[in-house]
Image: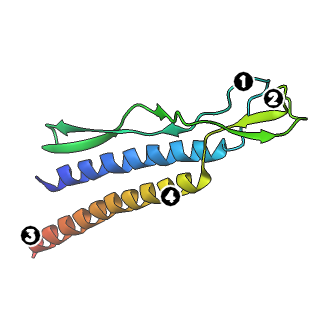
Amino acid sequence: MDFNSSLRIAATGLHAQTARMRVIAENIANVDSAGTAPGEEPYRRRIPTFESSFNADVGGRVVEIGQLAYDTSDFTSRFEPGHPAADQNGYVQYPNINTLIETVDMREAQRSYEANLNVVTVTRQMLGRTLDILRG
């Protein structure tokens, strides 16, 4: 495996983690997005998935963002009789999003992103040192 392959593999990891962080940010942004009418479902939490495949161009396995899955857990209900989406008992359904879980997922995505970025940095440093040796 050469330097370019290392860089391209790390780049796929950077791209996948960026997409993951985007989905997590959407979840967090919609934590209070209730429906607009009684019986209407609120925003449903999305879960990013990843797919690994062999890429012959780089001679290794790369990661890609896969299909978005939906969290099938129950929505939360709050008693808000004045809300336009309140049912006949005064309860409004809110998304099945736990901000603590989203925050932990975001931190994990950030760490994976940083690890891939470190691969890029180290590969560039190694390439620079190799060029220095060849010049000298």
On residue 136, which mark appears?
none
Question: Callout 2: few (<14), some (14-19), or many (20+) C-alpha neighbours within 10 Å?
Answer: many
Q: Are marks 2 and 1 in contact (CB under 8 Å)?
A: yes
Q: Which residue is mark 2?
A: 85
Furthest residue toward right? 82
Going by the image, does 114 lie left or right of 54?
A: right
Q: CA distance from mark 2 to mark 1?
A: 7 Å
Give the mark nearer the N terminus: 2 vs 1: 1
Name the amino acid type tagged 4.
Val
Foreground: disc 2 or disc 4: 2
Q: Are marks 2 and 3 in contact (CB under 8 Å)?
A: no
Name the amino acid type tagged 2.
Ala
Q: CA distance from mark 2 to mark 3?
A: 70 Å
Question: Callout 3: few (<14), some (14-19), or many (20+) C-alpha neighbours within 10 Å?
Answer: few
Give the mark nearer the N terminus: 4 vs 1: 1
x 47%, y 39%: residue: 47
* Percent coordinates x, y for residue 117 in the rendering: 35, 60
On residue 104, which mark appears?
4
Q: Which residue is mark 3?
A: 134
- Residue 3's place in the image compared with 19, above or below, is below
User: Which quarter shows the C terminus?
Assistant: bottom left
On residue 40, which mark appears?
1
Foreground: disc 1 or disc 3: 1
* Percent coordinates x, y for residue 2 in the rendering: 12, 54
Name the amino acid type tagged 3.
Leu
Question: Callout 4: few (<14), some (14-19), or many (20+) C-alpha neighbours within 10 Å?
Answer: few
Near-viewer residue (135 or 54)? 54
Q: Are marks 4 and 1 in contact (CB under 8 Å)?
A: no
- Residue 33's place in the image compared with 113, above or below, is above
Give the mark nearer the N terminus: 2 vs 4: 2
Q: For numbered disc 4, what is the local secondary structure?
A: helix
Name the amino acid type tagged 1.
Glu
